[in-house]
Image (cartoon, grey):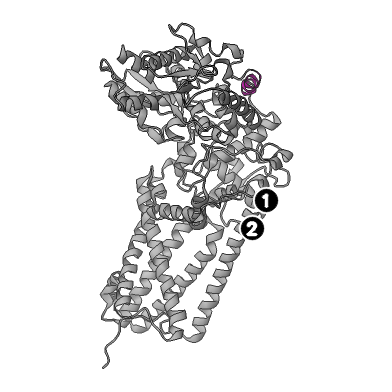
Amino acid sequence: MPELIPTREIFRHFPTWAQLLFYAIAFGGTLIFFYGVYSRIQKYRQGRPENRFDNLPGRFVQALTTVLRNKTIYRGDPFAGFAHSLILWGFIVLFIGTVIVFIDHDILRLLGYRLLQGTFYLWFSLILDIFGVLFLVGLVLMWFRRTLVMPFKLDYSRVDRKEEEYDRRGYATDDAVFLGLLFFIGVSGFLIEGFRIYADQPEWARWSPVGWLTAEFLSFMRLSPATINFWHATTWWTHAVAVMIFLAYIPFSKAMHMFTDFANLMFRDENVPRRLPGITEAQMKEGMGYKKITDFTWKELLDLDACTKCGRCHEACPARSAGQPLSPRDLILDLRTFADATFGTSEWFTQKVNGWDTRTAVVAGDVIKAETLWSCTTCMACVESCPVGIEHLLHIVQMRRTLVDEGNMDDSLQEALMNIGDYGNSFGQPERARGKWTQGLDFKIKDARKEEVEYLWFVGDYASFDPRIQENSRTVARIFNKLGIDFGILYDGEKNAGNDVRRVGEEGLYEMLVEDNMAVLQKARFKKIVTTDPHSYNTLKNEYPEFGLEAPVFHYTQVLAQLIDEGKLRFNKKLNYKVTYHDPCYLGRYNRETEAPRKILQALGVEFKEMPRCGTNTFCCGAGGGRIWMDDSNIQERPSEQRIREALALGELDYFVVACPKDYAMYSDAVKTSGNEGKIEVKDIIQLVEEALS
C-alpha cells in the first residue's frame, strides 16, 4: 500500500457543477468589490490635484512599517493596540494562506505541480491554525471592548446636534456586521477543518490542532459518515458565501479602512499642521477657502474615508471637553457623508443628518457649522491622536478661510485681526510702543536693525504688550544679559508673526505680516533667532523658510538648556518647590520639544510632578487658533480651568510652570476663575531661573 502524502482536497466530494457554482459566486463578489473600489477612486479624482507623490518608495516603506508594527494603534490605547495586532496579523496570515491555496489549486495544479503537500502542507496547516486562533481572540477582545467596556470615545453621540437631527444607528450596525462577519468566517473555517478531519481521519491531523480538537469533540456525538459529510458541505458553502459577502462588503463599509488607512498613512504630510499650505491663484479666483466639497483635494477626500470612527480625536479635543460644538471625528464623518451624497458613492450602513441639500449646501457654514469651526484651538491633538494620519486641522483652516472671506466671525476676533492689520499687533497699540516693555531695565537692549547680534529675539505680541507678561520679558532680558548672550530685538520693526492669524484662516493678512517681517529681518544682522513665544516659534521655524528665512530658530528654553549642557549656566541655589510643568501645544506637540524645559527644571532642583497629559500628549490651554481673541463666556469649563484641576489632582504643589506668554495669561486667569487662588501659582520657568541665579 503506497504511503499517503499529507495534503487535503479543496473541493472535497464536490461535483463539477458545484465547483463551477463556487467560481461564479466568487466572480460576482470580486466584481462588486472592484466596482466599489472603482467608485471610491472616481470620487478622489473629483478632488483638486495635490502633489503627494514625492519619494513614493520611502512613503510606501514608512506606511508599511507603521501598519505592520501597529504602533499608531498602540499609542494611547494599549488594549486596542493589542487586540488590533492579533486581528491584523491573523488576517494577514490567513489571507496569505488563501492566496497560496488559490495558486496551488488553480494555477500550479493545472501545470502538474503541487505545493500544498508533504512537510510544507503540515507547517502550512499548523501556522494557519495558530494565527486563526489569534485572529478570533483579537475579535473577541474588540467585541468585549465595544459592548461591555464601551469607552467614552466609542460613543457615537454628537456634541453639536440634537438627537432628533441625526441617526447613527447605521454606524453601530456597520461595527457589528464587520466584527460579526469576520468572526463567523474564522469559526466556520475551523468547523470545516474539524468535520473534514473527523470524516477522513488523516494520520497528520494533529498538525491542524484546532481542527483535530474539534474532531475529537465531534467523536463524542457518534455522527454517521453521511451526517458528517452533510455538515462539512453545508459549513463549507456557508463559509464560502460569507467570504464572498465580506469581499463585496469591503468597499461599502468600515472594512474599506484596510485600504484607505494604508494609503492615507502613505500620502500624509508630516509637516501638517506645522506648516500650512497657502492659497493658489486658481483658488483665489473662486474664493479664499472651501465652499464646495469639490474644493477639497483628492488627499483630503481620502482623509474622510480613512476615518475608522475610533473616537481618539473626539476624546482628545479640548473644545469638545469644554462643552463646545466641535468633535474632530464628527466633522470628518459629516464631510464624508456629504461627499458620498454629492459624488454618489454609497456606504451600506451610514449616518443620516437632517437639513442637507447637496445642491445648495456650503461645507463651511451649512455642513459644518460656523460655531463648530470657530471652536477649534488648533492644538493638533486630533492629528496627534489619529492612528491613520487624518489631517483634521487642515480641513478646519481651509473652511475657516471661507468664513473669514465672508466676514462670518466673532466681533472680538474681527477687532483683533483689524488691529493686527492696522498696527501689527492684536492689542491695537501703536507700533512705536512695542519696545516700551524694555523701560526699567538697567541696560539697553541692542537694536538688531542697527547692530549685529548673535541672537535676534522675536518677542511677540503678548510678551511685548500684556502688562501681566512684560515683567517676564524683562526677566528674560536680564538673564540673557547676565549670561553674556549677545542679543537684540527689532523694536517697532517687529510685527505679529502671524501663526494664529494663519490658523484663524486670514491667509491674506498672514502673508502681509510675513512680507513686512521678512523685509525687516533681511535688513537686520543676526545669526540665530530666539523667541519666548511657541506660536511665533512654530511659524518662524516651519513656515517662514518658504518665504526666504534661513536662520535657525530656537525657543528660549532650548538656549538655556544648551548653556546648562555646556556648563555656562550654573545655579547658585536649589529651589525647594513642588511644581508641575505644562507643555505648550506649539512647543511640545507641534515641534517635539519636551526635554529642554525639563532639563532646566531638573537643574533647578525642584520636586517635579508630571501631569497625566504631558509631552506630545499635552492638553491645550485654549488660546490657540485665535481663541484667545474670541468670546469664551459660553464655555462650560474652559480648557485652562480643566488643566488647573488636573494639576491640583497631583497633590500639594507650589507652582504651575509654563514656558509660553499665552499660557501665562490663560492659566493666571484660570487659577482665579476656578477659585484656586492660594492653592497654586502660575510661574514662567524664567522666573524660577532668575530666583535660582540670585
Question: Which circle marks residue 216 in the picture?
Answer: none
Q: Please tell me whether residue 581 is drawn above or below residue 162 in the rendered image.
A: above
Q: Nearer the viewer, residue 513 or 70?
A: 513
* Residue 496 image position (x, y, % from top left): 57, 23
Tell me if 631 is positioned left or right of 404 in this view.
left
Is residue 508 found left or right of 488 in the rendered image? right
Residue type for callout 2: Gln
Q: Secondary structure at mark 2?
A: helix
Image height of 473 relative to 19, above or below: above
Mark 2, Cα crowd under 10 Å, few <14 / some 14-19 / many 20+, is some
- Which span is picked out in magenta? 412-422
Q: Which residue extends farthest bottom?
A: 1
Residue 224 image point, x, y percent = 33, 82
Q: Main secondary structure of the magenta part?
A: helix
Residue 144 visible from this viewpoint: yes
Quadrant where the N terminus sits is bottom left
Find disc 2 in the rendering and name its residue.
Answer: 42
Check the image and report above or below for 602 versus 97: above
Name the one closer to the observer, 646 or 276. 276
For the point 58% across and 56% down, the residue is 347
- Rendering quarter of residue 641: top left
x then y, percent, for residue 12: 40, 82
Instruction: Tell me which numbered mark, 1 or 2, is placed earlier along the sequence.
Output: 2
The residues bearing labels 1 and 2 have C-alpha atoms spaced at a distance of 12 Å
Q: Amino acid at mark 1?
A: Thr
Magenta stretch contains residue 538: no
Quarter of the C terminus within the rendering? top left
Q: Is residue 684 visible?
A: no
Marker disc for residue 342: 1
Q: Nearer the viewer, residue 244 or 624?
A: 624
